[in-house]
Structure formats: structure tokens, C-alpha cells
Amino acid sequence: MIDPLEINRLNWDERATIHARDTTGMYLLERFRAGEDALHSIEDAELGDIAGKHVLHLQCHIGRDTLCLVRRGAIAT
């Protein structure tokens, strides 16, 4: 029997490869890699100073938003 957790991990690994290509430009990965913040203005306004705070982004998808939080000084879990 195949481990369900392994099936899930393989599924996410495959999707990550697809998303990393960002062929549609929807994720703005080139701009993000160049240092641009990818959070929406409403998120920026609500967050305030998060430097040194521990965060867990439950719906971060490919991790870009979590990396934005880390760039702002947060500690990601």
C-alpha cells in the first residue's frame, strides 16, 4: 500500500514545479525575485510591524506570501 502522505507530497512537488515556471505571470515571480513585495495593499495595511513575530500562513500556496512576511522580519513556522 502506498503511503497517503507520500502521495500528497508527490502531488505538491509536481504542482510546485508547474507553479515555479509561472508561464502566465500570475504569480509575478520575476518581480518577487527582484525584491518586489507581493502582498496586497489591504494585507500591508492590516499587518503593521511584524518584525520578530512568529507567523504561520495557512493558505500560502507556493510560499511567496510567507517569504514576503519573512522579508518584513517575521519568523515563519
Image: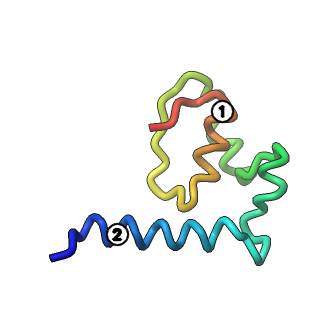
**The label number, if any, that marks residue 56 in the structure image:** none
Vertical position of residue 74 compared to residue 18: above or below: above
**Residue 59, horizontal then vertical, whole percent:** 48, 58
Which residue position holds label 2? Answer: 8
Residue 7 is drawn in which quadrant? bottom left
Foreground residue among 27 and 53: 27
- Quote the CA–CA distance across marks 2 and 1: 35 Å
Mark 2 against mark 1, which lies toward the viewer? 2
Foreground residue among 16 and 76: 16
Question: What's the residue type where badge 1 is placed?
Answer: Gly
- Residue shown at 27%/64% (left/top)? 5
Residue 19 is drawn in which quadrant? bottom right
Question: Which of the image's four quarters has the C terminus?
Answer: top left
- Residue shown at 77%/77% (left/top)? 24
Question: Which of the image's four quarters has the N terminus?
Answer: bottom left
Which residue position holds label 1? Answer: 48
**Residue 55, horizontal then vertical, whole percent:** 49, 37
**Total numbered badges shown on the rendered structure:** 2
CA neighbours of label 2 inside 10 A, class few (<14), some (14 to 19), many (20+): few
- Residue shown at 51%/36% (left/top)? 76
Foreground residue among 44 and 74: 74
In what element is the residue under mark 2?
helix
In what element is the residue under mark 1?
loop
Foreground residue among 10 and 47: 10
Question: What's the residue type where badge 2 is placed?
Answer: Asn
Direction from residue 12 to residue 34 in the image, left or right: right
Direction from residue 28 to residue 48 in the image, left or right: left
**Residue 3, horizontal then vertical, whole percent:** 21, 69
